[in-house]
Amino acid sequence: MLNVVAIVGRLAFDPQMRQTTTGKSVATFRIACDRGRKDARGQMLTDWLDVVAWERLGEFVCQYFQKGQMIAVTGRLQSRSYQDRNGNNRTAVEIVANSLDFVGSKAAANTQQGAGYAAPVQRPADTNEPKLTGEGDDDFAVIEDDGDLPF
Amino acid sequence: MLNVVAIVGRLAFDPQMRQTTTGKSVATFRIACDRGRKDARGQMLTDWLDVVAWERLGEFVCQYFQKGQMIAVTGRLQSRSYQDRNGNNRTAVEIVANSLDFVGSKAAANTQQGAGYAAPVQRPADTNEPKLTGEGDDDFAVIEDDGDLPF
Amino acid sequence: MLNVVAIVGRLAFDPQMRQTTTGKSVATFRIACDRGRKDARGQMLTDWLDVVAWERLGEFVCQYFQKGQMIAVTGRLQSRSYQDRNGNNRTAVEIVANSLDFVGSKAAANTQQGAGYAAPVQRPADTNEPKLTGEGDDDFAVIEDDGDLPF
Amino acid sequence: MLNVVAIVGRLAFDPQMRQTTTGKSVATFRIACDRGRKDARGQMLTDWLDVVAWERLGEFVCQYFQKGQMIAVTGRLQSRSYQDRNGNNRTAVEIVANSLDFVGSKAAANTQQGAGYAAPVQRPADTNEPKLTGEGDDDFAVIEDDGDLPF
DNA sequence: TTTT
DNA sequence: TTTT
């Protein structure tokens, strides 16, 4: 199976952080994604999409993003069943974030990182993966130096 | 803005075709997308996602797919507001299909097309685009023959 | 089969427009996509990706985008075989654009469209598809008004 | 920035595993992705795409996949510079895998997992992320039970 | 309920 | 260089 989503939009509200009973942190936010065309009444058509960001991803979005800012989200679609206040079964569809990133340089500058671009933030477990240790590409270069290309 | 979804899953029901009052046809179907892991009770976790397929895409899915079959869907996420039977405002999030395709060979064989593989079906307006006329790649080859590569 | 790409990056050069021998126009451009982290020497790691935009999409990118501007691209990956000037067989991998859009507001303002946001541009044949005629959503609303939701 | 790819195709060769000098394992494989239409000579048009899978993802693909089998890949596009045997600078574009999964049930059955479906395999660091511990959804359910929905 |  |  395969389930991938990529969205760029603006935060409709400030992100909200919560804690689960088992101690995990999770942030939720909503993004407005304009379709780039208007309806018959001249109003911009917009899709409103909910995003769930766990742990380090959630901390990142709460620290650097607020209402109105543009954000790039990748992740997967999730459906979730719940009962509304009247006891009716409802289904919510939301995006579980896999990576979050700034879009445009202004917001990125807010992070006060040297490059002007904030590092893309991925799921917590990514921290000991090659690309975040800074040695992944060098490793790969070694393969190349051997005249021993991967393909 | 950017809004892209790619999903592979199984049809939860046979697709349903409708007509709009202005004469457009639209098919809707639901796909089950297993997450590949089970919950605490040993039940496979599944995301249920609704898909909207307009016109030629809708006709295609109704003709070749039924409940239980695997399908590959690309498209965009759409939120849609409506009132439920109690007059409450609700929001539905669904995928508006941009392309549909078979996954695995059995279903593809059902189309009885010479190639054994059905052509991926894209939105109606794609018909006079290079890739469906069969000349797009040749054109591009001409560029190459000139030693005049695009990049 | 399924083949989807979504990228946000900056144009490395001004887009270049060409004509095929059969009269189709095709623009090519390269985008720089920062990985958000630096190599061991402190240099930002960047992926350089080539994009092919046919007909109306190509005209759009040439009209509104130049070197350095940010762009959102969706499309599919394509491999293409050619011979280099020494007669060696080479393979190029590039993105065939399916939609192009502005990212951030400055570029969007350049289009001098009333809304401040340029419409996302999709492949030519999309013009008689619901979403560009401006009636698609209304049609769908009709379905809703019937209390006859698609799902 | 944003960089996402989702592909379904068949392995052109058996995957190949290598070790970097720093001890990381990396598998590479090529997938054939049919475009679903033929060229002027009646030959199926196919895109050939290279994939890089690090560590646990690489071990997974080597264990469960061989030439000819279908695979679902998500990841990001990477460009990589190298010198060919003549000392010319070349650029390769490949997919760095983020998740790998079976497509269709037959291959999945090979893994001899109870469900008949193999778990999707994601990057190593994901192991202590909610969704692989099996408690993520329960946690989320707790939020719901509180009548305290995320949105 | 976001932005230009 | 893959498959039906």
Image (cartoon, coloured by chain):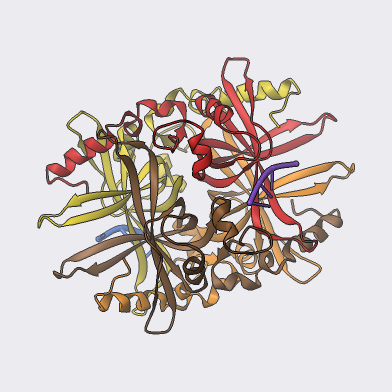
Chain colours: A red, B orange, C brown, D yellow, E purple, F blue
* Closer-to-camera residue (B144/C45): C45
Taking the view exactly as shown, the residue that stands out farthest to the bottom is C22
Q: Quadrant of the C terminus of chain D?
A: top right
Residue B9 point in image, percent of width and height: 55, 48
Tell whether A90 sits left or right of A111: right
Residue B110 point in image, percent of width and height: 52, 65
Let me know if residue C149 appears in the view. Answer: yes
Tell whether D3 sits left or right of B8: left
Taking the view exactly as shown, the residue that stands out farthest to the right is B86
Q: Quadrant of residue B58?
A: bottom right
Residue D9 point in image, percent of width and height: 39, 54
From this view, report whether residue B25 is shown above or below residue D139: below
Q: How many marks do you count on the picture?
A: 0
Q: Quadrant of residue A128?
A: top left
Residue sitting at x 89%, y 43%: B87
* Closer-to-camera residue (B138/B43): B138
From this view, report whether residue B148 is shown above or below residue A66: below
Residue sitting at x 58%, y 57%: C108
Taking the view exactly as shown, the residue that stands out farthest to the left is D86
Taking the view exactly as shown, the residue that stands out farthest to the top is A22
* Closer-to-camera residue (B57/B102): B57
